[in-house]
Amino acid sequence: MHIKIGTRGSKLALWQAYHVEDRLKEAGMTTEIVTIETKGDKILNVSIAKIGSKGVFTEEIEDQLKSGAIDIAVHSAKDMQSSLPEGFDLVAFMERERCNDVVVSHDKTNTLQAGKKFVLGTSSTRRVATLRHFYPHIETVAVRGNLQTRIRKMEEGACDALLLAYAGVHRMGYEEMIAEHLKLDEFTPAVGQGSVAIEVYASLDAPKRDAIREALNHIPTEQCLLAERSFLKTMDGGCSIPVFGLATLQGDRVNMTGGIISLDGQQVIRKEAGGLKENAGAIGQSLAHEVLNAGGDKILESIKNQS
């Protein structure tokens, strides 16, 4: 069985694709990797929120899936919009890496806990809003591009430090640059952060689809991400909305924390929900309704009016 793997061309995206390739080869399949440039890779001078969050890193790859030029697409799960276009499906979520955010800097005194003022580079509305709430003394500047580009921009003076996901920093071998691991109860991650998602199109034949899922899917991660993605879908939150959500599995239960933060950081609504793992989707949906009913709907409306 031969699998054509579609991916973006950044070093981190290729790391993910090679990771997938290794697992498929272990399962006895042959593979080839096809790199595809996306809108999000081409437009680096504006934030994701301004480009428009729907499919910014996925649209061109999905075109290739639909045409049959590739069999699977490899994505960071956090880049996947909550509602996929008709005919597309996520068949596997790979085992999740540590999902917290980190501060990366050559100067290890650049930490949020230290209380000093410094300029932090991030293009995430969630991270900026969270900083405004917990650490208003920190100045932020938008820094986009792949990990290597962001580090180069920092070294050229765009900022003193970067706010990034641990998973990418770890996978690219930059752990020695981590100045601080951020607490999950303050910087609750984006939905899906730390996991790799595998996307297919409906025309992929069933035996191949089943074999791919068998080789790549990590069921405990999947159960958590089903709750998180259901939460995100109900919240109607994309890359431009500072929604956060993290589910964990404890025995046969999924427990989830999720919420929304206003762009100015003044309002944070955070709720928790839990239940049996087979009801993961319903748990995420219920949690979203709780957040919306507690005033999240007004924050969401305000953000959409500003964009």
Image (cartoon, rainbow, N blue to C red):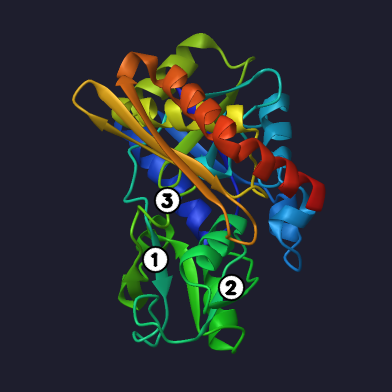
- For the point 32% across and 25% down, which residue is it? 219
The picture places residue 124, in percent across and down from the top left corner, at 59, 59
Find disc 3 in the rendering and name its residue: 188
Check disc 2 and report the residue beneath it. 149
Residue in the image at 56% along x and 55% along y: 126
Residue 174's x, y, as percent? 37, 71
- Residue at the left extreme? 251
Task: Say which mark, if any, is on residue 120.
Answer: none
For label 3, the SS is: loop
Mark 1 vs 3, N-terminal side: 1
Q: The disc labelled 1 sits on which kind of residue?
A: Val
Confirm whether residue 47 shows in the render: yes
The disc labelled 3 sits on which kind of residue?
Answer: Thr
Callout 2: SS: helix
Task: Tell me the SS state at disc 1.
Answer: strand
Q: Which marked residue is nearer to the observer: mark 3 or mark 2?
A: 3
How far from the left and from the top, in percent, is residue 199?
A: 55, 29
Q: Earlier in the sequence, mark 3 or mark 2?
A: 2
Q: Which residue shows up at 57% across the image and 30% down it?
A: 293
Amino acid type indicated by mark 2: Thr
Distance between the alpha carbons at the discs numbered 3 and 2: 25 Å
